[in-house]
Amino acid sequence: MFIDAIELDISAGDGGAGSVSFRRARFLPRGGPDGGDGGRGGSVFAQADGRLRTLNHFAGVTAIRAGRGGDGGSNKRSGKAGNDEVLRVPLGTEVRDPAGTLVGELMRPGERLLLARGGKGGRGNTHFATSTLQAPRYAEKGQPGETFLLRLTLKLIADVALVGAPNAGKSSLLAALSSAHPKIAPYPFTTLAPQLGIVEVPPAETFAVVEVPGLLEGAAEGRGLGHDFLRHIERARAVAIVVDIAAEDPERDAGAVLTELDEFDPALRRRVRFLIANKIDLPHSADARERLARFGFPVAAVSALTGDGIPELKQLLYESVGSHDHTGI
């Protein structure tokens, strides 16, 4: 199971009520008001956690409620503040309201976003005493907490996105490049969810690569699996199209992927840095590589099976995105 989008009914806690109370003492029959204030209601936050990769821990969750503030007491005792709720989410999670307006996004480990603010506690009757009203017998109720229906959507943060037709060898390539262990089998759609891997470049550099499930023509309109996961390409700094050069028509496959990227978001095509011609260990690969060059992108030739060209590809990918901090990726 891979959950990357959820809707939650978010409710912050109501503020506690202020107290109506008067001082009681043996030698003070006419004690003044001493009602305390209500406590604030708990708020709801989202916080980025670099250890998380999905929203799976929200499976079956539809509503989040923060704690109500405690009521005020006598002797000017304030009510206890309600407990906050903090939702841990992966880096790259964005929050939108039902109209699609962006509330915020969480991109750095530990970053916190307020989703719903707790209600303010009501004032006790102490606050309402005046020279003409020395014994007020009323206090404020607590204010209600904010409530929102919000949609949380994960867009994976990676430096390079690997895209291509089903069975182009993306999973094998990711496994050859990184420490990731995606499912690999000789039939299409073995990858049913994006896979993230960390690539090490000597002497001590790293960058993140995401493999997106295979794209079919029409993916941008919802055909196949690509529509669900194309958004995970949006934050990648570079896109590499993996092409099976042993396929019936490698040129057509590469062209179809470029078309889908254009139709989903034209800006994605501008992020394509090169084509990766995979399976060069098979016959007739040289001709296919030459034909792919017509798209105007550099062509990197590799074999995920034998490891040919993999060290050079790692360096090429690294140089295409440059060095930067990957904390939490």
Image (cartoon, helix red, strand yellow):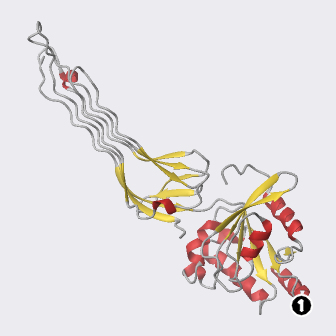
Please tell me which residue lies in front, 150 or 86. Answer: 86
**From the viewer's perspective, is residue 137 above or below residue 59?**
above
Please tell me which residue lies in front, 205 or 257. Answer: 205
Residue drawn where x is 77% and y is 81% of the image: 243
- Residue 167, given in percent of the width and then of the height, sits at 71, 83
State which quadrant residue 266 falls in: bottom right
Taking the image as shown, residue 126 lies to the left or right of residue 231, namely: left
Secondary structure of residue under mark 1: loop
- Residue 75, given in percent of the width and then of the height, sits at 22, 19
Quadrant for the C terminus, please: bottom right
Residue matched to label 1: 284
Q: Residue furthest left?
A: 29
Residue drawn where x is 76% and y is 57% of the image: 207
Q: Amino acid at mark 1?
A: His
State which quadrant residue 151 falls in: bottom left
Would residue 273 be visible to someone looking at this image?
no
- Residue 100, given in percent of the width and then of the height, sits at 46, 62
Taking the image as shown, residue 169 lies to the left or right of residue 228, namely: right
Taking the image as shown, residue 80 lies to the left or right of residue 85, namely: left
Please tell me which residue lies in front, 219 or 55. Answer: 55
Please tell me which residue lies in front, 95 or 173. Answer: 173
- Label 1: how many residues lie within 10 Å, few (<14), some (14-19) or many (20+)? few
State which quadrant residue 178 falls in: bottom right
Would residue 286 be visible to someone looking at this image?
yes
